[in-house]
Amino acid sequence: MMENTILEVQNLNVKFNDSFALRDISFKVDEGQFAVILGPNGAGKTTLLKAILGLIPYEGTVKIFQKRREELTKEDRFKIAYVPQRFEGTKSLPLTVYEFLEISFPPYGRNLKDSISEFATVGDVNRLLSKKISSLSGGELQRVLIVRALLSKPKLMLFDEPFSGVDKIGERAFYEFLKYTKETYNVTILLVSHDVYNITKMADVAICINKRLVCFGNPEDVFLEENFAGIFGEDVSTYKHKICKEGGPCEFYKDHESNNH
Amino acid sequence: MNPIIIRSLIAGVLTSFLCALIGVFVVLRKMSFFAHAVSHASLAGVALAYLTNTNPFVGAIGVGLLTGVGVSYFVEKSQLFSDTIIGILLPFSMSIGLILVSFVKGYKPDLMSYLFGDILSTSKFDIYLIIAISIPVIIITAILMKRFILISVDIDLAKIRGYNVILIDYIFMAILSLIVLISTKIVGIILVSALVVIPPATALNISRNMRETFIYSVIFGIAGSILGIGASYILNLPTGPAIIFVISVIFLLSLLFKKS
């Protein structure tokens, strides 16, 4: 059976002020796969997502649904959902959660009201609908952003560090939710993370970057010495020893700050 | 009723409605300085109109609109913040305006009325011009309303959707400029940004959602202009300051009802 490629990145370069933030990145993700982008701080993970989404200029080719960006139709674009790491500017916003979900979609097509109540139940945000978006906690806002992403019934979902600001219990629940989403709606997921331990159990594909592509393929390969070396550059064994505790979560770095290019 | 009062009320209600509506975006996007710049730039247009013997209101709108779109252009092309660009363009256009004013020979009767507004001098032509500009502005705003909100709230999503964010932003700036400029007729160049900022800020104090923010803002704007025009007619006060005084008092009262 031919695999249906949902996302294909070829020879992608991103430059900031003449220096490469990303260089010669190529990989592809097939339909229904769960792909994870791994890498240390400043590796260009967020930059990669933004380039894929066309939010920043880049060189090279990004094909989504086997189409170049300019070939994407309006409907295609609705099938791409993005859950950002931070959502700025909600502080003085008078929007309620319901209005926030509502304005994210034009009034054509299916019944928005039904969709909102369906996905609000799925994402457990029903009781938040009449609250102001500015009054939500980090975890609540995260769930609302995910519900918003699901509303357009996407085929491809991109998540940027979905666990920043979410505790461990929330993290586990989120994995369950992702699994449910992936299986129920047959979405392809591309997720930026630093949580190697849980991800390797769930992901089908790992894409490790440190400005360049370090590994691409089986998530287990991330643990190979040469890949770790490629990601971190130096002092691999100490690093690995320090951060990969027996049976516990294995994290690439300790502080939860991530690059924000 | 006195036709002058009817004309003033039409102009006052129409412009305060538009200011209060578009003002919600101005407050959310922290653009009150922009409204200030566009209105001040229009002084150059007034002076230019005097020198070329054309209608000063038309001159004000022309030059003000150019400045509004110019700000968007320079913000997009340079790496500078919009308040820096405005900080450059506002004094620049003001200086051109003041230099041009110095060339205007003899009596300059209308200049004061442009600075502080003179609603009671609103001519039939002014009213037609205000209406002619308002109609397309209302239609375009109604069509693009949701996109204006989305761009104010989440510009990345708008870009992912493939919306032409830059073009929509230019349209927004042009609409805002036009609304501010036709409103200078009512309250003048110096006070006009208050008409765009105060009613939405008042609404934000007491509204529970976005819909209410728009509704309250428009109510406060229109109520303020009717009360202000009425007070200025009865008590013989300058109209522009009377309107701004009323909406400012409503704002202060709204603070008492502000939800924490």
Image (spheres, grey):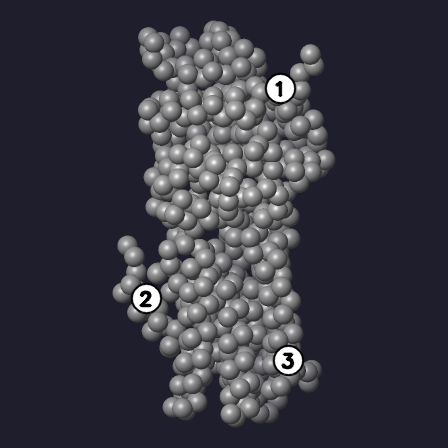
Identify which residue is drawn at 50% across, 76% down.
Answer: B13
Q: CA distance from mark 1 to mark 2?
A: 55 Å
Q: Kindly state the secondary structure of the residue where label 1 is placed.
A: strand
Q: Residues within 10 Å of mark 1 (few under 14, many from 20)?
A: some
Is A70 situated left or right of B3 in this image?
right
- The N terminus of chain A lies in quadrant: top right
Q: Kindly state the secondary structure of the residue where label 3 is placed.
A: helix
* B213 over A22 or under it: above or below: below
Tag 3 residue: B128
Q: Position of residue A235 (x, y in %)?
A: 41, 11
Q: Could you tell me if residue A252 is visible in this image?
A: no
**1 and 3 marks on the same chain:** no
Q: CA distance from mark 2 to mark 3?
A: 35 Å
Pointers 1 and 2 in contact (CB under 8 A)? no
Q: Position of residue A83 (x, y in %)?
A: 49, 34
Relative depth, front residue between B59 and A74: A74
Tag 2 residue: B254
Label 2 sits on what residue type? Ser
